[in-house]
Image: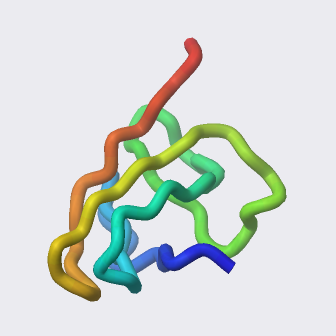
């Protein structure tokens, strides 16, 4: 699957599993708090692009919204 895992349930933060630049589609539970949902990739609400130079580094993803 995709090399992106949800780390700490902090608003707008996900944990990257690979050291590559990955583009993952992750559903957003709370748009106001920007809380990302885990594992369910089939339900797509937003597109998250994360660039990680270091494996397992917690980054703030750029959430692209059409609204």
Q: Is residue 18 left or right of residue 6?
A: left
Residue placed at 38% from the left, 83% from the top?
18
Image color mode? rainbow
Outermost top residue: 67
Q: Nearer the viewer, residue 28 or 64?
A: 64
Residue placed at 50% from the left, 55% from the top?
23
Q: Nearer the viewer, residue 10 or 27?
A: 27
Quarter in which the C terminus is drawn:
top right
Residue 10: x %, y % from top left: 31, 65
Quarter holding residue 56: bottom left
Q: Is residue 66 left or right of residue 14?
A: right
Residue 64: x %, y % from top left: 46, 30
Residue 42: x %, y % from top left: 82, 58
Q: Nearer the viewer, residue 66 or 37?
A: 66
Q: Is residue 33 above or below residue 21?
A: above
Q: Nearer the viewer, residue 30 or 2?
A: 2
Count of residue discs? 0
Quarter holding residue 55: bottom left
Outermost front residue: 20
Residue placed at 34% from the left, 73% from the top?
20
Quarter in which the N terminus is drawn:
bottom right
Residue placed at 60% from the left, 49% from the top?
29
Residue 16: x %, y % from top left: 36, 76
Q: Is residue 13 left or right of residue 54?
A: right
Outermost right residue: 42
Q: Is residue 15 above or below residue 36?
A: below
């Amino acid at each position: 699957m995709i090399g992106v895992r949800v780390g700490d349930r902090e608003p707008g933060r996900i944990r990257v599993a690979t050291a590559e630049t990955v583009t993952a589609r992750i559903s957003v539970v709370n748009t106001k708090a920007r809380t990302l949902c885990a594992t369910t990739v089939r339900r797509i609400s937003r597109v998250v692009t994360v660039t990680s130079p270091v494996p397992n580094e917690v980054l703030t993803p750029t959430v692209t919204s059409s609204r």
